[in-house]
Structures are given as structure tokens and as C-alpha cells.
């Protein structure tokens, strides 16, 4: 596709994510070791009093989901941690859409959203992942709804996001990982999409997450966590972007040392809370918020129910 064929939404994405090589930030090659040393210096004392309770091979796995949960309502975090994961239509829909978008990057024919979704479902059904059992066992009406909703998301992506050129080095759902304190703390994530690559000490990578619905501060924190893990691996990315498929809007944030410092402190605070709750047996606090509506404790939680009632009664701002 020639650049003149891009629609206004696609051009807006290119304008936001693109950057002349001469304007890309440089990062000190020692930053990787500096961040690791800082994290390990502040994480190590958290484990000193737990030597009798944690086995040598037991690590704390830190993900964007874990951080969002433990840094939110602690009672909700503990309740959901004890729940057995079950696939639901919204989670399966997102997984199918992400797989279809991944296939679209390498599709040799004209990409058609429904075709990509069908191939994604077929691929997931043949995988060794738990979603395979969910897809093969769901009712036909549920399967049709999943197909329709996933195709809607893929259509939005193809309408609003520019076709990904090979020279942009697009990579989807690629796991990233960093181990600290000889594996006692493991940071892991899987960005939806990355573009570009570092060249020497010049940052060139852009990390992108796709979302539906409204903006949440947690979306920004998710990407900052990815930036930190990437910095511990090789070099920080130059830009973070959340792309809202329903709105064709992009929220971006440039990566800086201050941003990485904030992400580092959040990891330390999150691990501290995790150990407090699970190994030091500190009572969990209650922090009502929008996530109350999905909390398994809601039916017995007066604070959460009142928060949702008050929120529903609040006047809308025009």
C-alpha cells in the first residue's frame, strides 16, 4: 500500500509512532546493569526474614496483571488468586483476535477478517493450550458470538492501523523475561505488538498494547512494566503506545530514565505487598474502585457495593 492510500486514522498512527533516526533517544549502555543492581538491592531485604518460609527454588512471578491486582484492592487480589482460572467469552474473544492479528502479518493472500478469525480458532483448537478445550466444548451459539466479536476487533485493527511493513520488524505476542536475585523474582510479559529495534545505544523499539473500552491508568502502568523488562534485557524502547481499537485513538508515552525509575519502584512495592500478604500474613486492605463490579467478594462487600451505587448515581459530565 502506498502512503497516499492510508486513511486518516492510519496516517495518525504513523505520525505518532514514527520518528526520524536522528531524533531517537540514546541510553547509557550501563543502564541495564544499573537497573538490575537497583532492583536487587531493594528486593533482597524483602526476602531476608522469609528464609524459613520460602524454598530456594520458589520465585515470585511478577507480571503486569499481578502488579495491577496487588497494587489495587488487596482483598480482591487474594480472593481471585484462590480462584481456578476459567475461560470466558471476553477472554477467549481477545485471545482469538490477537491470534488473528498475528496471522495477518504473515498472510500471503488478501487478509479478510473472518477468514483470519476462522484460521485463528482452528489453530488454537489444535494447540496444547487450555483454550483448545474451551473452544471445542463451547456451544454453537457461543462459538458464533465469539467469531463475530473477534472479527469485529480484527476489522477495527485493519481499518485503523496501517498495514505492517516487514522493514518495521513487527513482532506479536513475543514473551519477554528478566530474572533477579538468581530467580527469586521473575519479571515476565508478552506485549501485543513491537515495532523496530535498538541500534547500538539508540532506542528504536515501540511497544504497543491493543485495548477496547475506555482509558485506564493501569494501561499506562502495563506498558511501563514492559519497558522496564525490555531495558533489563537489552535497551529501553523509545516509545510506549496503547491503541484503543473501538475509538481508533492512540495514547503514547516517551520512555525516559524517570519513567523506568517509576516502574522499578512499582515492582519493588508490588513484591513487598505480595510477600506481606502471602508470607508475612498482614491483613489485606480494602480499596474500592471500578474493578469492584468483577470482584468475587462483591456480594458480601458493603464497601464495594456502596462504591458502585455511588458511582452509578454520580451525574455525567457533558
Image: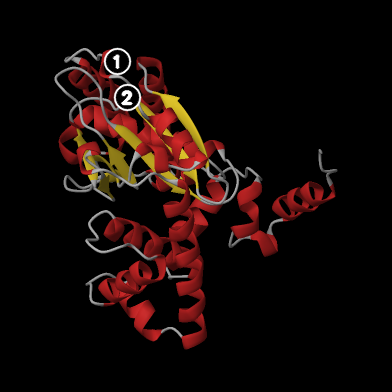
| Callout 2 secondary element | loop
Q: Residues within 10 Å of mark 1 (few under 14, many from 20)?
A: some
In the image, which disc is placed on residue 238? 2
> Could you tell which of marks 1 and 2 lies nearer the N-terminus?
1
| Callout 1 secondary element | loop
Image spot of residue 40 (x, y percent): 24, 26
Note whether 36 is above or below 243 in the view shown.
above
In which quadrant of the rendered view does residue 182 lie?
top left
In the image, which disc is placed on residue 94? none
Near-viewer residue (13 or 53): 13
Near-viewer residue (133 or 269): 133
Disc 1 to disc 2: CB gap under 8 Å? yes
Tell whether 222 sits left or right of 170.
right
Note whether 105 is above or below 218 in the view shown.
below
Q: Residues within 10 Å of mark 2 (few under 14, many from 20)?
A: many
Residue lying at 50% horizontally and 51% vertically, measured from the top left: 77
Image spot of residue 133 (x, y percent): 33, 79
Image spot of residue 33 (x, y percent): 18, 20
In which quadrant of the rendered view does residue 121 lie?
bottom left
Near-viewer residue (212 or 56): 212
Q: Visible in this render: residue 62?
A: no
Residue lying at 57% horizontally and 40% vertically, measured from the top left: 216
Note whether 79 is above or below 262 in the view shown.
below
Note whether 208 is above or below 58 in the view shown.
above
Residue lying at 46% horizontally and 59% vertically, measured from the top left: 155
What residue does disc 1 label?
A: 25
Tell whether 267 sits left or right of 233.
right
Per the model, the C-alpha gap separating discs 1 and 2 is 7 Å
Image spot of residue 290 (x, y percent): 65, 48
**Which part of the image, by quadrant, shows the C terminus?**
top right
Amino acid at each position: 500500500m502506498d502512503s497516499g492510500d492510508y486513511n486518516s486514522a492510519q496516517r495518525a498512527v504513523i505520525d505518532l509512532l514514527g520518528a526520524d533516526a536522528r531524533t531517537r533517544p540514546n541510553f547509557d549502555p550501563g543502564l541495564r546493569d544499573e537497573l538490575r543492581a537497583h532492583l536487587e538491592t531493594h528486593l533482597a531485604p524483602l526476602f531476608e526474614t522469609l528464609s524459613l518460609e520460602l524454598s530456594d527454588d520458589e520465585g515470585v512471578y511478577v507480571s503486569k496483571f499481578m502488579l495491577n491486582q496487588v497494587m489495587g484492592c488487596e482483598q480482591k487480589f487474594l480472593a481471585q488468586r484462590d480462584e481456578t482460572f476459567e475461560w470466558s467469552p471476553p477472554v477467549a474473544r481477545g485471545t482469538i483476535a490477537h491470534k488473528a492479528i498475528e496471522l495477518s502479518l504473515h498472510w500471503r493472500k488478501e487478509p479478510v477478517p473472518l477468514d483470519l478469525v476462522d484460521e485463528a480458532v482452528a489453530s488454537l483448537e489444535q494447540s496444547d493450550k487450555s483454550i483448545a478445550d474451551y473452544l471445542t466444548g463451547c456451544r454453537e451459539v457461543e462459538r458464533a458470538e465469539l467469531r463475530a466479536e473477534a472479527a469485529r476487533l480484527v476489522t477495527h485493527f485493519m481499518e485503523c492501523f496501517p498495514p505492517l511493513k516487514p522493514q518495521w520488524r513487527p513482532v506479536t505476542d513475543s514473551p519477554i523475561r528478566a530474572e533477579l536475585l538468581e530467580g527469586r523474582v521473575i519479571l515476565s510479559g508478552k506485549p501485543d505488538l513491537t515495532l523496530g529495534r535498538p541500534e547500538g545505544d539508540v532506542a528504536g523499539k515501540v511497544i504497543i498494547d491493543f485495548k477496547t473500552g475506555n482509558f485506564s491508568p493501569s494501561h499506562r502502568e502495563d506498558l511501563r512494566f514492559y519497558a522496564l523488562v525490555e531495558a533489563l534485557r537489552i535497551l529501553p524502547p523509545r516509545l510506549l503506545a496503547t491503541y484503543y481499537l473501538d475509538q481508533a485513538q492512540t495514547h503514547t508515552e516517551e520512555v525516559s530514565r524517570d519513567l523506568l525509575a517509576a516502574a522499578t519502584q512499582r515492582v519493588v512495592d508490588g513484591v513487598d505487598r505480595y510477600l506481606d500478604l502471602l508470607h508475612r500474613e498482614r491483613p489485606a486492605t480494602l480499596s474500592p474502585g471500578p474493578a469492584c463490579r468483577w470482584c468475587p467478594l462483591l456480594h458480601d462487600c458493603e464497601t464495594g457495593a456502596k462504591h458502585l451505587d455511588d458511582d452509578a448515581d454520580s451525574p455525567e459530565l457533558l
